[in-house]
Each structure stands twice: as C-alpha cells, then as structure tokens.
Amino acid sequence: MGLTKKKRVVKEVQQLIMITIGAIIAAVGLELFLVPNDILDGGIIGLSIITAELTGLNMSLFLIIFNIPFLYIGYKRIGTKFTLHTLYGVIVLSIFTSYLHHFEPFTDDLFLATVVGAVILGAGVGLVIRTGGALDGTEIIAILVSKKRPVSVGQFVMIVNVFIFVLAALLVFSWETAMYSIITYFIAYKMIDIVVEGMEELKSVTIISDKPEEIANSLIQELGRGITYIHGEGVYSNEPKKIIYTIVSRIELSSLRTIAQEIDPKALIAIENVADVSGSNFRKSSAH
C-alpha cells in the first residue's frame, strides 16, 4: 500500500508540474503575442477581457468570477481531482499573465502575433487538458460535450469563441480584431487537438476475408504490427470467421491495403480514425 501511495503522490506531482508548464506556455502566448496586439482571447478569458474593458475593473477578478459556475459543473460531472487541477491551472495562468503583462511583446506584427501566439496558446491549453485539467470554463463544457457528441474539444472551443469574437466586435473592439481573433483560434484549436489527441494520425483497421491467416501473417512480416483476431460468424453461411483487427499509422495504411487486396481482392477493409493509443501492443510487435 505504501508503494502504491508513493506512486500516486509522484504521479500527482508530475501532473501538477505539467499543468504549471501548460499554464505558463498559455500565458506566454497571451501576454507576449496576442493581448498586446489587441487580438482577443476566447472563452472565459475573452469574456473577462470584454467585461474589464466595459467596466474598467481588473480582468483577473472576472476570470475567477466567470469560472466559478463552470468549476462547479466540473466538480459535479467530472470529479474533484479534475476540478482542483482546473482551479490550480486557472490560478497559475492568472499569476503568470499578470507577471508577463509588464514585459514587452515579442512582435507587433499582427500576422506573426496571430500565428505564433495561437500555436503557443493552443499547445499550453492542450497540455493542461491532456494532463487532466483545463484553463478555461468553456473547456470543461467542451470535454463533457466531446464525450457524448462527435465533436472534439478544440472544435467546441472554436465554436464558442466565434460567438465571443462577434460579441467583442459589436461591443468593444473592431471587426478587424475579431477576424484576427477567429484566425488565432482556428490555429489554436488545431494545436489543442494535436496535443490532446496526438500528432501522428492513427487508423484502426478491420479486415473481413476468407483468407485471414494469410493476410495476418503478411501484415506481421511486412509491417511488424500486432494483429488481433476477432471471432465472428457469417449471418447467411453460419460459418465461423476470423476478423482481423489492427492499428497502423497513416503512412502504413497504403501498404496494408495493398497486402490485403493482393491476397484477397474481395476482402472488406474498414478504416476508422483513432484519437490515441496506449499500451505496449501498439508498437511494432508480434502477433498476440
């Protein structure tokens, strides 16, 4: 039990370090690229910036107030650990945006600020989400929605931000600022997806063939991937069937198709996108 508890503590410390790094990266993207060039942030931070502009009060005050209901939803729907990680991430983000606010921005070129700032911000936010937290209340809702709908976290955040940018253009900033902000978040949400779901595009492949052993053996020899047989049964023939299941990278997909179709031109090959893979069996291995 002592060893298990020690592992838990070590893992928690590692997670807090990663959330800290992610929040600092996001703060750099915000304060050294986006905010000084009047490029609006989205989500709760965007709403906080708009409200601060309208009221003249400090943005950090609204950052905490606006996040409270979302943190409560996260606590009820996702759990205490996630909520505490998010609260910690928001606090670190607030501290470092306040600290970095006094530094000169890296560039006053709007195009460079938009692209580089978006990449940095998206990487920071994605790192926090991947670790098990969030930096913005809208991300909590995005995570809940992504579990029930075929929408990624980044896509949902982008949709919410478009509405915020339109609101900003109407109330506080210019349409030019809103348009730059939309470009920023188009790039940022792609970065969030890359960090959260992985850069390498993986595909799960199901092959139904009358020659499963031949295909499986060839795939192992040529690609070195682990193969799993799923045992099924033909509806009309009532005959048992070995269905091949494997996971390959996008680059290997063409080779897989060629191998399967050369052995059995009538083989049914179904391909699906895979967001992430964990476990040693995915890497180059023998049959299992």
Image (cartoon, rainbow, N blue to C red):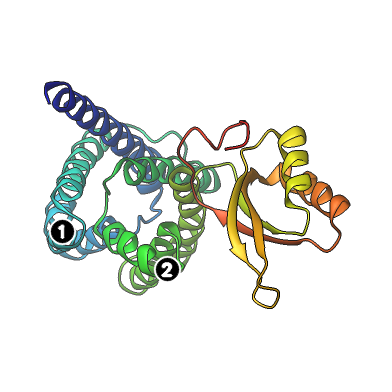
Where does residue 14 sit, x and y in percent of width and height?
26, 28
Left or right placement of residue 158 versus residue 69 in this view: right
Q: Amino acid at mark 2?
A: Ile
In the picture, the disc for residue 241 is: none
Q: Quadrant of the N terminus?
A: top left
Above or below for 199 versus 175 = above
Which residue is drawn at the image coordinates 12% and 61% (left, top)?
72
Amino acid carrying mark 1 in the image: Gly
Judged from the image, the secondary structure of the residue bearing numbered disc 1 is loop
Which class describes the residues within 10 Å of circle 1: few (<14), some (14-19), or many (20+)?
Answer: few
Q: Label 2 neighbourhood size at 10 Å, few (<14), some (14-19), many (20+)? A: some
The residue under the point 39% across, 45% down is 126
Distance between mark 1 and mark 2 Cα atoms: 28 Å
Q: Residue at x 61, y 38 (%)?
A: 226
Q: Which residue is at the front of the view, 126 or 169?
A: 126
Residue 200 sits in quarter: top right
Q: Position of residue 99 (x, y in %)?
A: 22, 33
From where the camera sits, is residue 278 visible?
yes
In the figure, is residue 99 to the left or right of 235?
Answer: left
Q: Looking at this view, is 42 or 124 the one in front?
A: 124
Q: Is residue 252 left or right of residue 58?
A: right
Q: Position of residue 32 (x, y in %)?
A: 37, 37
Q: Residue furthest bottom?
A: 236
116 vs 89, nearest the viewer: 89
What residue would you read off at disc 2?
159
**Residue labelled with disc 1:** 56
Quadrant in the picture for the C terminus: top right
Give SS at disc 2.
Answer: helix
Q: Residue at x 78, y 52 (%)?
A: 257
